[in-house]
Image: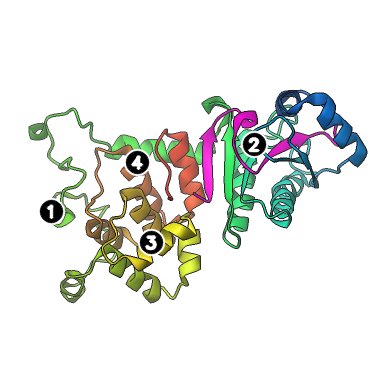
Amino acid sequence: MPLEIIRNDITKVHADAIVNAANSALQQGGGVCGAIFAAAGAEKLQKECDAISSCKAGEAVITKAYDLPARYIIHTVGPVWHGGTCGEEKQLADCYKNSLALAKKHELESVAFPLISSGIYHYPKDKALQVAISAIGEFLLKNDMIVYLVVFDKAAFVLSEKISSSIKQYIDENYIDENISHFKRDSYICEENLVPEKTMHLLSPQILEKSKRNLSDIVFQVEESFSQMLLRMIDQKGMSDVAAYKKANIDRRLFSKIRSDINYQSSKHTAIAFAIALELNLDETKDLLLKAGFALSHCNKFDIIVEYFIKIDNYNIFEINEALFYFGQPMLGA
């Protein structure tokens, strides 16, 4: 997918380029920088860096990757955190923007980033994550590239306290343990692929609060396939195909398959990704899912998190993927 958050050692990621959180002197340091130098071959890499000499905060330079599985290393210097009053946010965003611009200039197809400045430079991890997602997401809405945001372990990934608390509360209020027998449930039937219309009377008023479908809409849509319905909705929203698949975090090649095959069998995650891209309400999302043979379930934390974002009208797929990754769920996109 265009943006994927992964847990890995960045020195082992197979991408056209990995990004080094460098120091301004481009010297082998500690942390991620030290690990990259060591894995690449410190002496060879340092010699090339010495020839470049230096790099300012927010800027980026490129070198060979030597012994790494990547082809290149993009070195960018993140800001030191001074409380957020010294232009740190702009400098950090520039790290991502300039690194991506350099990758585009060299016609690279994939880039892997660490969470820049969140280590020894003490940039708060939740704020660093927000800047990274925003800058990368903005780039991907206008460009084709696969971008990985690499975190070494779960402890290195921090969602904002406000968002994580709200989602946790929503899950607690709505999640139904699939191990509880059906006869003990009086508010929801836990069958992920159950036709939504058959359970409408069991849904809570909060879930039904958005605008409803009318009868003519339902009758008109009966004979549509998933592909037909998706393409019709894209046209109705006044979106271009490119805008739709980019906002859905979907690869162009996959969208071409959907467009060219009237009977395309979509995965649930792809269908939901397009529902988010088109900013569909809950009823519309269920209709699109039904065409792909799926439904939302309160036995599934993934579904509840997606429902949460739809209900608060947050359709930023990159922010939704942040939350899904944090809660250990699969992410949206191809």
What residue is drawn where x is 80% and y is 25%?
A: 42
Residue topped by disc 1: 201
Residue located beneath label 4 in the image: 302
Occupied quadrant, residue 221: bottom left
In the picture, the disc for residue 5 is none
Distance (Cα) linking label 2 and label 3: 34 Å
The residue singled out by tag 2 in the image is: 115
Q: Which of marks 4 and 2 is nearer the N terminus?
A: 2
* Range shown magenta: 1-26
Mark 1 or mark 3: whose residue is earlier in sequence: 1
Indicate which label's residue lies in the foreground, 4 or 1: 4
Discs 2, 1 touching: Cβ within 8 Å: no
- Of badges 2 and 3, nearer the viewer stands 3
Q: Which residue is drawn at 54% across and 48% down?
A: 3
Disc 2 packing (10 Å; few <14; some 14–19; many ≥20): many
- Nearest the viewer among 172 and 19 is 19
Q: Check if residue 14 falls in the magenta segment.
A: yes
Horizontal side of residue 328 vs 32, given as left or right: left
Q: What residue type is labelled 1?
A: His
Q: Is mark 2 on a helix, strand or loop?
A: loop
Tell me if I can see residue 53 in this picture: no
Q: Disc 1 vs disc 3: Cβ atoms closer than 8 Å?
A: no
Q: Which residue lies furthest to the left in this view?
A: 183
Query: For mark 3, does the 10 Å Cα neighbourhood hold few (<14), some (14 to 19), or many (20 or more) residues?
Result: few
Up/down of 195 relative to 232, above or below: above
Q: Is mark 4 on a helix, strand or loop?
A: helix
Q: Horizontal and vertical percent for residue 277? A: 43, 60
Helix, strand or loop at mark 3 = helix
Left or right of 113, for residue 215: left
Q: Which of marks 2 and 1 is nearer the N terminus?
A: 2
Picture disc at residue 257: 3
